[in-house]
Each structure stands twice: as C-alpha cells, then as structure tokens.
Image: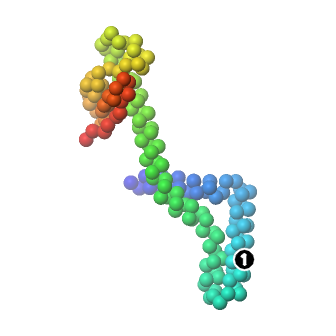
Amino acid sequence: MRKYWGKVVKRAAKEAGAAVFTSPEKAVISFLLQAGVGLLLYLALGEADVGPEVRIASAFAPFLIFPLIFLWKLLTVPASIYEEQRAEEEQERKGQVFFLSDLYVNESHVDNEALIRRGLALPPEDWINAKLEELNFNWRVQYKGGVQYVTKDVD
C-alpha cells in the first residue's frame, strides 16, 4: 500500500509541476507574477482596516497555485492509474488468448485452423477456460459472439 501511495504522490507532483512549471523560463515568470500579485495584495490591504496577519496571508495566497493543483491531482491520479493498469491487464489477457488459440490449433489440428490463425474464430470457450485454470490464471473468458469476448476475474 505504501508503494502504491508513493507512486500516486510522485505522479501527482509530476503532473502538477508540468501544469505549473512547463519550462524554466515559465517557472521564473510564474514566480515573478505571483510575487507581484502578492505584493499588490499586501499593499492594497494596507489601506484597508485589516490586521497584519490578513495582509501577510493575502500576500502569500498567489503562491498556493502549485499546492492546490497538487491536491487536485492527488485526488484524480488514483483513478487514472487504475484505468491504465486495467488497460495493460486487458492487453496481457488478449495476448494470452491469442497464445492459447495458437496452442489449440497446434494441439488439435482442427478444421477451422485457418480461421483461428487469422483471428476470425476462437477455440471453444470451455477449452480456453480449462487451460487458463490449468495455468493458474485468476480470470476466464466469456464469449459474446463471433470473436468477441470479455474477461472476468474469478475468486
């Protein structure tokens, strides 16, 4: 779990940094603009009837851009990481189904060998699922028709 959150924090910081500091020149310009806005707020509030704490807090407010973007990224990055991992997992599963289809043709010498090799047909669902179980995979296929299928995790 610690490794996962370390990855999340690292990616959130990288994305927030890329959003705020796209280049060294832009980082310097951004800092100068934030400092200018902070100074203007400090001076403008000097004429208002507020205490020094409010003036100082207002002067530092423009510098919260990076922390705010970082917090926003920290909330959104886990969903992105999950989706990326899920897409990678689906690609790996498709590769395994392709491998098992090739294995089926090599072992069985079936009539529709050419169709299976070209990806126009699949081996029987029961055969693929039995091989997945034999190879200790924690997922199975469910055919949807033609060469369409979905993969499902098993307990």
Disc 1: which residue: 40
Q: In this view, does 34 lie to the left or right of 125?
A: right
The number of numbered badges drawn on the structure is 1
- Name the spot of residue 119 as percent of width and height, x first: 42, 20
Can see residue 131?
no
Q: In this view, does 54 lie above or below 15?
A: below
| Residue drawn at (65%, 90%) of the image | 49
In what quadrant of the picture does the N terminus appear? bottom left
- Name the spot of residue 152 as percent of width and height, x first: 32, 37
* Circle 1: residue type: Leu
- For the residue labelled by badge 1, is the local secondary structure a helix, a strand or a loop? helix
Furthest residue to the front? 145
Q: Is residue 143 left or right of residue 80?
A: left
Where residue 85 sits, quadrant-wise, is top left
- Name the spot of residue 102 as percent of width and height, x first: 38, 18
In what quadrant of the picture does the C terminus appear? top left
- Name the spot of residue 98 as percent of width and height, x first: 40, 24
Q: Is residue 119 above or below residue 25?
A: above
Where residue 30 sits, quadrant-wise, is bottom right
Between residue 78 and residue 111, name the one nearer to us: 111
| Residue drawn at (49%, 55%) of the image | 76
Q: In this view, does 95 lie above or below 153?
A: above
| Residue drawn at (55%, 57%) of the image | 13
| Residue drawn at (60%, 63%) of the image | 66
